[in-house]
Image (tube, grey):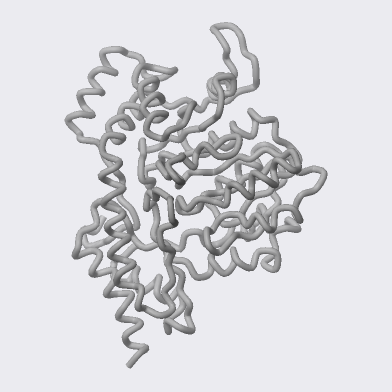
Amino acid sequence: MDKDVITVTSPLLPDLEEFNKMLRQIWNNKWMTNNGTFHQQLEKALCEYLKVPYISLFTNGTLPLITALQALNISGEVITTPYSFVATTHSLWWNGIKPVFVDIDPATGGIDPERLEAAITPRTTAIMPVHVYGKPCRTAEIQAIADKYGLRVIYDAAHAFGVEVDGKSILAEGDMSTLSFHATKVYNTAEGGALIMRDAKMKQRIDYLKNFGFAGETEVVAPGINGKMDEIRAAYGLLNLRQVDACIEARRQVAVRYREALRPVEGIDFWDDMPGVRHNYSYFPIFVDADKYGMSRDELYFKLRDQGIWARRYFYPLISSFSTYRGLPSATRENLPNATRMADTVICLPIHHELTDADITRILKCIISSYSKKQK
């Protein structure tokens, strides 16, 4: 890749010498997968770091979504958001479940609880919200509606590693939460993911399901899948856990710079930190008002690209606009005005632990110069 290109993110990488030491242990043990030593250590370490009771590691972030739906016997219809990565809704499709889209709260990017009750039908069995950009959903309101109608709640928390509200992990909300450890995430194992659950019995069921349903050498208790994390990625994850806090702090400092510089720029909106929330600064979305800023979102996006700044229109387009889902009654733009507006105006700026002051200055100059020209 061109060294002058500024990417939207950069993977957190473990120290190579330390990683090689752990690889030698794996080679010596000759135990590559199937709940090895490093796998067990990482599950324990993540439970402690994330303040959750039980966690099950997976080989990517999509399989926990698929498996959570299986473990809870979800069927029929599930209410979810169109403003997410496609894996959220694809997990429903793979389970033969009909997604029902509701609009989002523009203050959080997550499902608007005020839209939920109108979307519930006799076939509704669950709600699948997303903590977009790691920003917590309105979980108390969502849970109150779920309890009222006897619905399960599965959070797609792919962006929410380490996020807390008033000292409590956001991952403890709902019946289950899922994480992605993809290389683009704040914390990564190159590829990987996890499922967080509340009790030991469900943890055992999940562990069976991700290992083909095996409950012993000769007993299969359910039609499971192969979703296990291997020892190499578990070792990688253990090392990255040591440095993730420093990575998050570096991201926070980038966010502070962006906010200070962009606050005076009319037509560029962004979110501030939420009171009582420990954020992970996984993304820094801005929202472009073309009339006020003097340039459309896409014009600014391509200007950034032309200058070697690889920002991302994330999430654009909406899941509901893809061919697999656009025929659903809930997928219309009229039903999703806030989500449509956000998808049409968002740019996620580069934010990661390796951004330099010069990188940040270059990004800000590109954005502010366009506004300055309008003012002249």
Where is 289 relative to 37, above or below?
below
Which of the 4 image quarters holds residue 51? top left
Q: Position of residue 42 (x, y in %)?
A: 37, 26
The residue that appears at 63% across and 50% down in the rendered structure is: 141
Residue 345 on image: x %, y %:
50, 70
Q: Is residue 331 above or below residue 224?
A: below
Return the residue found at the far top: 218
Q: Is residue 372 left or right of residue 116?
A: left
Please tell me which residue is depicted at 43% across the width and 18% down the height of the picture: 35
Q: Quadrant of residue 111?
A: bottom right
Residue 211 vs residue 43: left or right?
right
How many labels sit on residues? 0
Q: Quadrant of the N terminus?
A: bottom left
Please tell me which residue is depicted at 38% across the width and 47% down the height of the picture: 184
> In screen coordinates, is 303 left or right of 144?
left
Task: Say above or below: 61 vs 227.
Answer: below
Q: Name the residue rendered at 47%, 59% in the picture.
A: 314
Instruction: Give the x, y percent position of residue 285.
Output: 42, 62
Residue 271 occupies which quadrant of the picture?
A: bottom left
In terms of depth relative to the viewer, which is nearer, 68 or 114? 114
